[in-house]
Image (cartoon, rainbow, N blue to C red):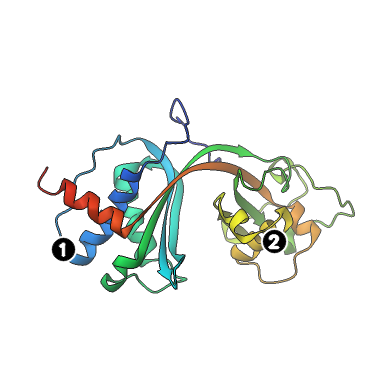
Amino acid sequence: MSLVPAQPPASITDDVCIPEHCYHAFDALYCSLTGAEPIPAKFADEKYPLFVTWNIKQRGEYHLRGCIGNFEPMPIIQGIADYALISAFRDTRFRKIDKSELERLQCCISLLTNFEYGDTYLDWTVGVHGIHITFPHPNLIQSSSSATPSPRTSSSGNIPRITSKQTFSATYLPEVMPEQGWDKIEAIDSAIHKAGWRHRITEDLRRSITLERYQSSKCCVTWDQYIQWRKANEGQH
């Protein structure tokens, strides 16, 4: 199933994602933890796949505290509010965010755009694209002696028919690869492990990958910026 939005917005610009999106996410978390009254969103309720990322400041630097999203286009007013809480409370890599951490948080919203299938697992650009990979269980992969990256395997008849329980998938947002200093192979191998494969990675495994690349419009705000926004907007609804 394609991750391409069925009806993408008419135009994609660098300011697709705006600070108000992040304020809305912060407001959802703040109100959930404090019982405060939420401030209604005033931005356009367009449909996008999206990710909400929480970072927390430790020793002067921000570190990941939670990140979850969805590849299905959704109305962003409800989607941002929902995934603000899902990423804060249900990212199994971390304990739930609590009220005592609010003042150290940074919120980033990524609205995903420009989905395309890659011809091979290397058909994407570091610093430009995010990647979403899927691959079958390696026991189902037919060995190949070729070292050349293969076309995406969804058009190949060499892979046995499989069920969803026998497939693996993972994604990395566009900013992850530059932040980690990864080249394409390092990013792909890390994504394979992230998908749940804990054993040796072979070239045949890499060649079995169906890769979809995408871009994102991203915006981040800090707690201090959110509080200034909330104080300015309280009593206006």
Horizontally, residue 89 falls left or right of residue 129, namely left
Amino acid on which the number 2 mark rests in the picture: Asp
Where residue 145 sits: x, y (%)? 90, 55
Q: Which residue is mark 1?
A: 35
Report the number of discs. 2
Horizontally, residue 237 falls left or right of residue 145, namely left
Q: Which residue is mark 2?
A: 189
State which tag comes first along the sequence, 1 or 2: 1
Q: Quadrant of the C terminus?
A: top left
- Residue 143 can be seen in this image: yes
Query: 21 or 172: nearer the eye?
Result: 21
Q: Quadrant of the N terminus?
A: top right
Q: Residue at x 21, y 60 (%)?
A: 31
Q: Secondary structure at mark 2?
A: helix
Q: Residue at x 75, y 58 (%)?
A: 205
Mark 2 crowdedness (10 Å alpha carbons): few <14, some 14-19, many ≥20 = some
Query: 15 or 87: nearer the eye?
Result: 15
